[in-house]
Structures are given as structure tokens and as C-alpha cells.
Amino acid sequence: MRGGRKLEKLLIQCITENQDSAYRLAYSYVRNKEDALDIVQDAIHKAFLSVEKLKQTGSLKSWFFRIIVTTSLDLIRKQKKVQVMDDENLEFILPGSHDHYPNLDLAQSLDDLPDKYRIIIILRFFEDMKIDEIAEVLHENVSTVKTRLYQGLQRLRVNLSEEDQEEAQR
């Protein structure tokens, strides 16, 4: 039982240190404040129920983030609806994006990307996760993550340059 208590303490520490990242990850899937909060709460509950099964504590963060991802996907499957991101929520997930890029709508271009690219870009650049960590969280192999990251960045670049051209024509 002592091992269980130690694991629970480590899990509490992991959740506390990564609560903002966990919320942003959930939010990047559902794009809705209330749903993202529900996902995090549900994922925390699931994590505590299954923490005893965890073999390596070194991958606790990746394990917890994987629960966030699967919980997010479960909710999306249940709801099967598309959510529009409003400015207040956009500012939360991409703080200061409007200040730094007044002529480019980075947030909108990111939002227009298919999930498989957007999630990887968010994890890599906004959550500062390494490629192998992202692979672990998403249950993908490293080469798939690298390919999708590259393709997502290419699409983002194209979207942004198209917006730039449209802006120049006005």
C-alpha cells in the first residue's frame, strides 16, 4: 500500500505542475471552456483510478496527457459537433497572438488545420514537448509525429502566406 501512496503523491504533483498544459491540451481538442474543464476533471479521476497500474513513474506526465487525449476524443465522439473558438478563448490558448502578429491571423490559421496537425503543433511549440513525448501521448510512432509536424507547419505557412496575399490586395 505504501507504493500506492507514493504514486498518488507523484500524480498529485504531476497534475499540479501541468494543470494549465492539461487544460490547453483538452481545449485544443474541444475548443470549449466548459468541456475542457470537464475533460481535465474526468482525466484526473481516471488517473487516480488507474495509477496503481502505472509501471514507470518517469513517464507520468506523458501517461496523464494520454488520458487527457483519450478523454477528449471520447467526448468528441459523444458530442459529434464542431465548436467555434471565440476571441476570449482564443486569447487563452494563444496568449498575445494578436499583439505579435497584427497582420497575420495565426490563431485562425492554426484553428483551420486538421486535428492531426494542430494537436502536434500545439504540443510541440505551445507545450514545449519533445517529439518522443508527443509520440507517447498520441500513441503514434516518432516518424509519424515528425512527418505530421512538418506537414502541419507547411500547411500553416501556406495558410498564413495566403492571408498575407489577401491582406495586400485590399
Image: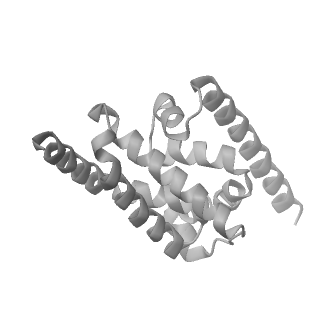
Q: Find the residue positioned furthest to the left.
A: 2
From the viewer's perspective, is 102 left or right of 112?
Answer: left
Q: Nearer the viewer, residue 152 or 63?
A: 63
Q: Find the residue positioned furthest to the front.
A: 1
Quadrant of the image containing the N terminus = top left
Q: Position of residue 96 (x, y in %)?
A: 50, 63
From the viewer's perspective, is 128 left or right of 45?
Answer: right
- Please indicate, yes or no, whether residue 93 appears anywhere in the rendered image: yes
- Please indicate, yes or no, whether residue 100 appears anywhere in the rendered image: no
Q: Nearer the viewer, residue 154 or 64?
A: 64
Q: Nearer the viewer, residue 46 or 118?
A: 46
Identify the residue at image location x=74%, y=57%.
Answer: 112
Q: Nearer the viewer, residue 169 or 4?
A: 4
Q: Position of residue 18 (x, y in %)?
A: 33, 52
From the viewer's perspective, is 22 left or right of 17?
Answer: right
For residue 111, above or below residue 57: below
Count of marks, rendered view: 0
Identify the residue at image location x=45%, y=50%.
Answer: 67
Quadrant of the image containing the C terminus = bottom right
From the viewer's perspective, is 28 left or right of 116?
Answer: left
Q: Position of residue 87 (x, y in %)?
A: 60, 75
Q: Position of residue 106 (x, y in %)?
A: 65, 56
Identify the residue at image location x=75%, y=51%.
Answer: 160
Res 84 quadrant in image: bottom right
Identify the residue at image location x=68%, y=35%.
Answer: 148
